[in-house]
């Protein structure tokens, strides 16, 4: 998880949210439906904007959406519709999520979002609460917020461990190639930039790489 800056509200949502909300609440009051229409709150324009915000990564686990069985992109209600129906079409409540984080997360009655890290809250740095041991994610210094974030979104599930291992192996191969290059002298500027690219926000699991590389002065 990393900090994500929200982009302006998509036009499709600006123009239609009041109409969509009215229809949803009326049907919900009659008991006809419990959830809003996926075709509305997850409209392609909304998904594209959310994807641009996170460089097409899940807001929670940082996997590239579309990669692996957990990677199918979905629009998640950060605060569940069952808890706050009037937030069904609220732009600040819509997050991009992989299937695993969205469908597998624990209900707010079990672990409230208020007790977890919020990627769209710039007042807190996830690196202050989360750390990695190899591909294994853990809470940093027994951070309660870090632990509950891992538990709520199941950031320690096997599928994510597998994806993180793949990324670490790619990085290991890259470093080996640098080591085996002729001369084995000091790293060039281009090589340093290539190493640092693994921790850039657009890279999958950039928090993990940022934590590791910062230890070595990158």
Image (cartoon, rainbow, N blue to C red):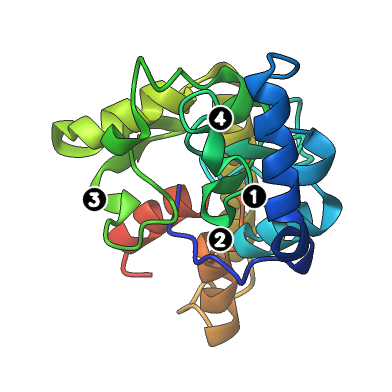
Pick the residue in front: 123 or 157. Answer: 123
Distance, label 4 to label 2, CA atoms, is 36 Å
Of helix, strand and loop, which one carries label 2? helix
Distance, label 2 to label 1, CA atoms, is 14 Å
Of helix, strand and loop, which one carries label 1? loop
Disc 2 or 3, which lies upstream in sequence? 3
Residue 21: which quarter of the image?
Answer: top right
* Residue 211 against residue 182 in the figure, above or below: above
Disc 2 or 1, which lies upstream in sequence? 1
Residue visible at 65% across and 47% down in the picture: 170
Distance, label 3 to label 4, CA atoms, is 30 Å
Q: Which residue is mark 2?
A: 198
CB within 8 Å, label 4 to label 2: no
Disc 3 or 1, which lies upstream in sequence? 1
Distance, label 4 to label 1, CA atoms, is 23 Å
Pick the residue in front: 18 or 137. Answer: 18
Residue 81's disc number: 4
Residue 144: which quarter of the image?
Answer: top left
Q: Which residue is mark 1?
A: 57
- Horizontal and vertical percent for residue 141? 15, 37
Residue 128's disc number: 3
Disc 4 or 1, which lies upstream in sequence? 1
Pick the residue in front: 79 or 48. Answer: 79
């Amino acid at each position: 998880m990393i900090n994500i800056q929200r982009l302006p509200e998509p036009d499709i949502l600006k123009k239609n949210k009041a109409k969509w909300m009215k229809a949803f609440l009326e049907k919900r009051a009659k008991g006809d439906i419990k959830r809003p229409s996926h075709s509305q709150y997850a409209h392609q324009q909304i998904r594209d904007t959310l994807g641009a915000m996170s460089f097409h990564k899940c807001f929670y686990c940082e996997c590239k959406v579309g990669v692996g069985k957990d990677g199918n992109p979905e629009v998640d209600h950060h605060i569940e519709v069952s808890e706050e129906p009037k937030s069904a079409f609220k732009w600040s409540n819509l997050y991009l999520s992989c299937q695993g984080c969205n469908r597998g997360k624990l209900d707010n009655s079990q672990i409230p979002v208020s007790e977890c890290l919020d990627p769209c809250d710039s007042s807190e740095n996830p690196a202050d609460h989360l750390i990695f041991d190899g591909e294994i994610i853990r809470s940093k210094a027994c951070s309660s917020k870090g632990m509950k974030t891992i538990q709520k979104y199941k950031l320690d599930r096997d599928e994510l461990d597998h994806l993180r291992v793949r990324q670490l192996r790619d990085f290991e191969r890259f470093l080996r190639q640098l080591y085996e290059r002729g001369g084995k002298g000091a790293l060039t500027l281009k090589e340093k930039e290539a190493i640092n690219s693994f921790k850039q926000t657009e890279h999958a699991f950039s928090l993990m790489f940022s934590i590791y590389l910062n230890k070595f002065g990158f």
